[in-house]
Amino acid sequence: MDGASKTISITVVACLGSRETREWVLDVPVGSTVADALRASCGISSLSMPVAGDSPQVGIWGRAANLDVVLQPMDRVEIYRPLKVDPKVARRERFARQGARTTGLFARRRPGGKSGY
C-alpha cells in the first residue's frame, strides 16, 4: 500500500475527581495494547490517581479490559478510579434522609391523585 499509515486513532479518558476528566486523542501503531496507549498518552503517569494494586482499573467503552488487550480503531480507553461509597449504600442513606413521601413515584403527585400514578 503506497503511503497508507500503519496507525489507528484512539481516545484515552481519565476521571481524576468528581466532574473532572481529561481526554487524549492518540495515533498509535496497529497492534498496540491498552498498556501501550497508557504509556503513549501524555501525563497519565503523572496523574495523582489512587490505584488499587500496581495496575490501574481500565476499560474500553465501559467494559472492563486487561492491559494486554489489542486496540481497534476508534476505541475509547477509560481509566477508572475506585468508588468512595457503594452506590447501594448511598441510595439507602439518601432514601432514609428524604423519607418515603418525597422520592420516586410519590415526589410529583397531582393534588388528589392516587398513590403511584
Image (cartoon, grey):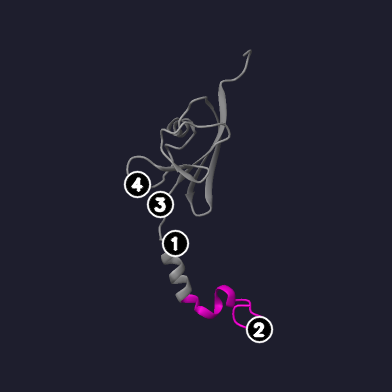
Cα distance in 3D space between marks 2 and 3? 43 Å
Sequence-wise, the earlier of marks 1 and 4 is: 4
> Distance of mark 3 from mark 1, alpha carbons?
12 Å
Q: Which residue is mark 2?
A: 113
The answer for how far apart the CA atoms under marks 4 and 3 are is 8 Å
Q: CA distance from mark 1 to mark 4?
A: 19 Å
Q: Earlier in the sequence, mark 3 or mark 1?
A: 3
Q: Which mark is residue 52?
A: 4
Answer whether labels 2 and 1 touch (C-beta < 8 Å). no
Q: Nearer the viewer, mark 2 or mark 1?
A: 2
Determine the residue positioned at 36% across, 40% down.
55
- Quarter occupied by residue 64: top left
Q: Position of residue 98 (x, y in %)?
A: 50, 76
Residue 51 drawn above or below residue 7? below
Q: Secondary structure at mark 2?
A: loop
The residue identified by callout 1 is 87
Q: What number of labels is visible? A: 4
Foreground tag (2 vs 3): 2
Q: CA distance from mark 2 to mark 1?
A: 32 Å
- Disc 3 residue type? Pro
Secondary structure under tag 1 reads helix
Please give the residue where the numbered disc 3 appears in the rendered image: 82
The foreground one among 111 and 83 is 111
Q: Mark 3 vs mark 1: give the one in front.
A: 1
- Nearer-N-terminus badge (2/3): 3
At horizontal 59% and vertical 78% (from top left) the residue drawn is 116
**Rounded to the nearest whole Å, what is the CA distance between mark 2 and mark 4?**
50 Å
Quarter holding the C terminus is bottom right
State whether residue 40 is above or below residue 16: above
Image quadrant in which you'd find residue 24: top right
| Region in magenta | 97-117
